[in-house]
Image (cartoon, grey):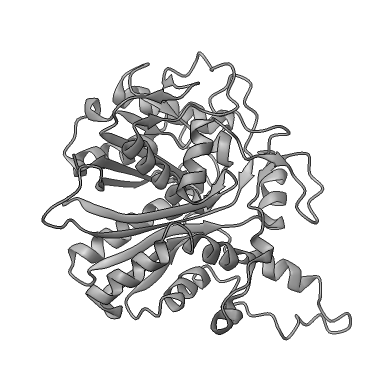
Amino acid sequence: MQPLLLSHFTTTSCIGRGLTATLASLRERRSGLQPCDFEGADLDTWTGSVAGVDDEVLRDDLRAYDCRNNRLAQLSLRQDDFEQAVHRTVARVGRQRMGVFLGTSTAGILQTELAYQRRDPLSGALPADFHYAATHNPYSVSAFVRRFFGLEGPAMAVSSACSSSAKVFASARRMLEAGLIDAAIVGGVDTLCLTTLCGFNSLGLLSSRPCRPFDVNRDGISIGEAAAFILLERVPGSLDANAVLLRGVGESSDAYHMSSPHPQGLGARLAMQQALASAGLPAAQIDYINLHGTATPGNDAAEGQAVAALFGELATPCSSTKGATGHTLGAAGALEAVISALALQQGLMPGGANTERLDAAIAVNYLLDNRAQPVSSVLSNSFGFGGTNCSLIFGRAG
């Protein structure tokens, strides 16, 4: 594939608002996970919440979209000069030539949960001020961002569980290659809600302590929330050596089980192989892998098998950043794409937070501490329920 330029990017999660705070947390190996205090969720687990989301006030012309998910989206869009960068690009390419491709899993479902608490006691009718299409609907966040910037180009939402905001890179790439757009906002937004917290609890997948990816005693996930946005464009004639490029994309669907991965990581391996092939890179040229690494026994073991089979046992340095951010579900792919970009620009391979004793049965080169060295290529994995898998390869232009 022809590389694409990540001309601007930003992220907001429990480890920080914007790139500076996010990078500082990664350097200090600081986790943002805290005991769950989400209203209505009396659960013995830890979450990664973003402070101040409920205090964010949407612009007057966007009030119909008011929900926690879109508030976090707006909060993140206003970090790192991202809003200004989009406006500059729109002025150059035009409103009809900018696409919006965003991933989410539950979108604004919290707004529906709150609406059900206010149903009419006699008729059961939902309150008149509840707007499903602008809040709960998975497309809500894409519509919100499109209107936030006054765009008129193609817009879509991808909701494929935890691969959602990785797969949007593939969607945007196809439209750019087809000549339908000249630039795209890609990313993902997911926020805490009772459906997610109670749903994963009912599956027995929540840890009662901060999650420990690839630890021998790992016992489940910690759910987080995040927003991440990337401005994706064709590569111009000249580039700064520190510029970050999307070099490869791989997608697969093993459809092994509704919620469990293929035990040998077949779908994961196929996605990684496709990403390498599309980038024209051998496995040996990947310097660091940002693992999906959810900290459940089955997911880590399956991904570990796939990585070891493709890259060699105890070979390529890798880690999961979910011990710091929590599993941000539909936003994880975009959040970890931005973390991958920071790894490339800063020469930083982040050590996995909270992991104490590696599972010796998983033969990967998992980093417990940060490693500072030049990084030229990063592979980032995002795997979702139902075996929907996506791997992305990013590289430094220099």
Q: Residue furthest right?
A: 122
- Count the labels in the image: 0
* Residue lying at 44% horizontally and 31% vertically, measured from the top left: 303
Across and down, in percent, residue 230 comes to: 37, 57
Front-most of residues 323 and 195? 323
Across and down, in percent, residue 221 comes to: 62, 37
* Residue lying at 38% horizontally and 31% vertically, measured from the top left: 348
| Quadrant showing the C terminus | top left
Across and down, in percent, residue 93 comes to: 23, 74
Q: Is residue 312 above or below residue 24?
A: above
In this image, 297 relative to 87: left or right? Answer: right
Front-most of residues 170 and 96? 96
- For residue 257, say whether it is visible: yes
The image quadrant that residue 350 belongs to is top left
Q: Residue furthest left?
A: 237
- For residue 274, say whether it is visible: no
Across and down, in percent, residue 123 comes to: 84, 84
The image quadrant that residue 391 belongs to is top left
Q: Is residue 19 above or below residue 371?
A: below
* Residue lying at 56% horizontally and 78% vertically, measured from the top left: 59
In this image, 182 relative to 206: left or right? Answer: left
In this image, 82 relative to 38: left or right? Answer: left
